[in-house]
Image (cartoon, rainbow, N blue to C red):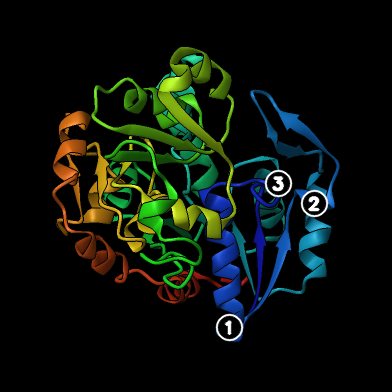
Amino acid sequence: MRVTIVTDAWEPQVNGVVRTLKETVRELQRLGHSVSMVTPASFRTLPCPSYPEIRLSLATTGMVGRAIDATECDALHVATEGPLGWAARRYALRRRYAFTTAYHTRFPEYLQPRLGVPLDWSYAAMRHFHAPAARVMAPTPSIVSDLEARRFRNVVLWSRGVDLRMFNPEPAGPNPREFLKEERPIFLYVGRVAVEKNVEAFLSLDLPGTKWVVGEGPQLAELKARHGDSVHWAGVLAQHELARFYAAADVFVFPSRTDTFGLVLLEAMACGLPVAAYDVPGPRDVLAGSEAGAIGDDLRAACLRALDIPRSRARQHAALFSWEAAARQFSSHLVGLRG
């Protein structure tokens, strides 16, 4: 098939949506499909308030429609609910094109603590966005069930994968256990440093050993000022460097209560790093009774329990997820432009 994906999230952004789309495109091409992308790179943009690294496209419906038609695609996928996503949705409805969408981000739960927007309001807007889609792809069974309970229609499962060659217990470079020489155990967080990621819940824990944070974001300065030298701040890392941090740490801490999946969970486990997380959708589905991590309402207790989990168990569970399988699942949900 000739597949066109419209997305507001793309390079140089560094996040799970971009990673998912890049890996999906790569695997779709390996499977023989032709993939075209409509991204902010093709339009004038302005920085998103509070997230300057995210660029919002200044594109009309006609501009996005011409970009879609130029690809001569067989199937259209609208990946995000941003300006490009809304424009693509309007154009598809105008031309009576069938299309699919994806639910990557729990925006209602993000907006509530930031702006005080009631969940019912923002879920109504999200439901309106996705209502015309032939399929709404969600990353875990819990998210599928949650959306169905909120009256979303045509919701299907589209899982995720991990690059087991890049992320492994013995990445290139010095012995991982010698790489980080700080006091052990080492508890590691990887991801955007933002209020919706709930990083403060991790940093405020009374834990033995050392805490590391890999990533940047709008809350970084605030958390650095609050926790200072009690935390090691590594910034944004390339994937091969990130693999060394995963392999060198003792527990991966995932404090988010709102992520729909959490690719970093798979990356950490692929490097043999057990996970500690809250018992919420995302971690609950990714771990799925595997005993590759510890989840619960008490994050500190989960961190301490995770110290006793064999690293081999984490790696074995991560090996169940592949980007090829996820891409095949994605392609199976696509529909032709004329339905």
Q: Do residues under tags 2 and 1 come within 8 Å of each other at their CB atoms?
A: no
**Which quadrant of the view contains residue 157?**
bottom left
Q: Position of residue 125 (x, y in %)?
A: 51, 33
Of callouts 3 and 1, the N-terminal one: 1
Q: Which circle marks residue 30 in the picture?
A: 1
SS of the residue under disc 1: helix
Q: Is residue 79 visible?
A: no
Toward the bottom, the furthest residue is: 32
Q: Tell me the kind of residue under disc 3.
A: Leu
Q: Which circle marks residue 41 in the picture?
A: 2
**Which quadrant of the view contains residue 259?**
top left
Of callouts 3 and 2, the N-terminal one: 2
Q: Position of residue 275 (x, y in %)?
A: 27, 47
Q: What residue sits 32% from the left and 40% below the top?
A: 186
SS of the residue under disc 3: helix
Q: What residue sits 18% from the left and 45% below the top?
A: 307
Q: Which residue is mark 3?
A: 84
Q: What residue sits 39% from the left and 27% below the top?
A: 198
Badge 1, how many Cα within 10 Å: few under 14, some, many 20+?
few
Nearer to the camera, 65 or 232 = 232
Q: Tell me the kind of residue under disc 2.
A: Ala
Q: CA distance from mark 3 to mark 1?
A: 27 Å
224 left or right of 146 in image? right
Q: Position of residue 323 (x, y in %)?
A: 45, 71
285 left or right of 97 in image? left
Q: CA distance from mark 3 to mark 2?
A: 11 Å
Badge 2, how many Cα within 10 Å: few under 14, some, many 20+?
some
Q: Is residue 141 visible?
A: yes
Q: Tell me the kind of residue under disc 1.
A: Arg
